[in-house]
Image (cartoon, helix red, strand yellow):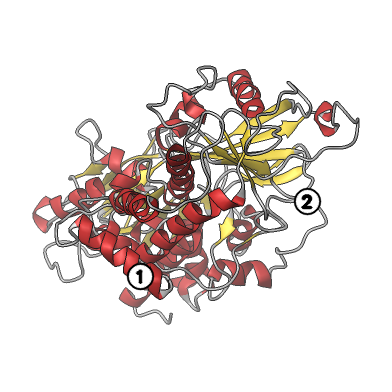
Amino acid sequence: MVSKKPRIVIIGAGMAGLAAANKFYTTANSKQLFELSVVEGGARIGGRINTLNFCGDRVEEGATWIHGVGGSPVHEIAQEEGLLHSQEPWECMDGILEDPVTIAEGGYELNKSLVEPISSFFNNLMDFVQGKPVDEDAVRVCCEVLKRCKLGSENLSVGSFLRQGLEYYWGLMKDQKGVNGVGNWSRKSLEESIFGMHEGIQRTYTSAGDLRNLDYVAEKEYVMFPGDEITIAKGYSSVLESLASVLPVGMIQLNRKVTKIEWRSAHSEKELLHMENGFENRPVKLHFCDGSIVLADHVIVTVSLGVLKHGICQDSDLFNPPLPCPKARAISKLGYGVVNKVFLELSPSSNYDQETNNPTKFPFLQMVFHPPDSELRNPKIPQWIRKTSFISPIYNNSKVLLSWFAGEEALALESLTDDQILDGFSTTIPNFLPTKSQSQKNTNPNPNHFNYSKVLRTQWGTNPLFLGSYSYVAVGSSIDDIDTLAEPLPQITNLESPPLQILFAGEATHRTHYSTTHGAYYSGLREANRLLEHYNCVV
């Protein structure tokens, strides 16, 4: 009697799934040991990585940056495969644009003497939160802010710490003479809105729609790689294509959405599962949207935390039997947010100053909006655009502009038509461009009017394959919940049922690199190695 090979099915052809598949297929003797397949619910590989061409430029709908080149496996792959250089232009190919122009709602360009002190204070607070080095004075200030936050109390949030820091800043500055307000802005309202602009940027970094939901303690356990943050010249998707290139044709099955995962929690529930070619005693049964069924010994689940959250809802039967309570609680408690990008094409008429007919350049524009309770807010500016922090060309002299959105505004963006988005930016930007000075509002109605001809926006929140963008540690959860999420079912130590039926990978399962592509990559390797070691295969 010929013994059957263990059958491994990887659900999801994103970074984690393809890293696992690549590891299996490139490990000595594993091709003969396992029967392997990758099932992907969508029509492409990549998951939350998707490189597109927009108006002649290479842009990223999802993951964009290699977060630190020192030690990053993504950078290593991109370097080895020659993906860091291209003859075609790509998003952020010259890094982060320097020297931003900061303009307050109403058309007031703000001097650095006003912007830099509060910006530097905010950055010191965030560096302290994330465990980065700060100078002695900043440490002293941050420690005082922590005292005011009552650090000993549970559930301190990053947002609460930052806002307490802002109050402390005002206390320090109240007796100091300096820059006054501008136009209809008071100095205090300007400082609060500049501070809020930086909070908005942090919302897109973390995917926490409200920083009051972002756990303070967990931020220090998040690990950043050293070195520059760069983008990938040939597109982030080229990294996935490199991982997938070693796999045989047919191993990745597209448009194969899993609707239910049946597994055995104990021998008492053991049953013979029927397949077309006879009976097989494999413990996991996968149901697909087309009605087909696949049996497996091991399944590596790499779907997003958003899909897992939906999968534990009462009206969902993604897992049968349901996941154990500790794992379900971890999934429920961890944070998962929505971040979307909007790309705009400048129309050709925007390239010339209407007064001089000379070519004009769209700046790296930081936008300072009036606070929500201000009566000075321009009612024509749509609410969904008010929490974005900047808009800029994707590289110097590009005709494509980029703006980021997070939280409720990112979700609201997904329901708008292209015309509504174009109209929103066309209404908003004139309130910020151009300006004459901090003290004088520009009186010329349209000296540098910018028009927009095309728009591309992402829709990660409503896409049923993702239901959001990336994870964070929410207030009320902890890094331990990430470890709980990453635990396989059942454990090898559980002798009542076949071990390692369901394994979990994906960025949300990595305790120090969650929310990143390299975290997803590491998690895929982790679960592949777990099974290779289980079968005593050389890793």
Q: What amino acid is at disc 1?
A: Val
Residue 511 in view of the camera: no
Q: Where in the figure is residue 188, as x and y percent of width and height?
A: 42, 41
CA gap between label 1 and label 2 equals 42 Å
- Tell me if label 1 and label 2 are in contact, CB under 8 Å: no
As drawn, which residue projects farthest toward the left? 268
**Residue occupying image coordinates x 84% and y 31%:** 353
Residue density around tag 2, few if under 14, some if 14–19, many if 20 or more, within 10 Å = some
Q: Where in the figure is residue 12, as x and y percent of width and height?
A: 45, 50
Residue 538 in view of the camera: yes
Q: Quadrant of residue 139?
A: bottom left
Q: Which residue is mark 2?
A: 89
Q: Determine whether, in the image, residue 136 is placed left or right of residue 217.
A: right
Q: Quadrant of residue 412?
A: top left
Secondary structure of residue under mark 1: helix
Q: Nearer the viewer, residue 144 or 325?
A: 144
Q: Determine whether, in the image, residue 106 is placed left or right of residue 164.
A: right
Q: Where in the figure is residue 2, as x and y percent of width and height?
A: 36, 68
Looking at marks 1 and 2 on the same chain, the residue that comes earlier in the sequence is marked by: 2
As drawn, which residue projects farthest toward the right? 357
Q: Where in the figure is residue 484, as x and y percent of width and height?
A: 23, 60
Q: Nearer the viewer, residue 278 or 120?
A: 120
Say if 359 sits above or below 10 in the image: above
Which label number is shown at residue 362?
none
Q: Which residue is mark 1?
A: 139
The quadrant in which the C terminus is found is bottom left
Q: What amino acid is at disc 2?
A: Pro
**Residue occupying image coordinates x 44% and y 58%:** 121
Q: Nearer the viewer, mark 1 or mark 2?
A: 1
Q: Nearer the viewer, residue 503 or 420?
A: 420
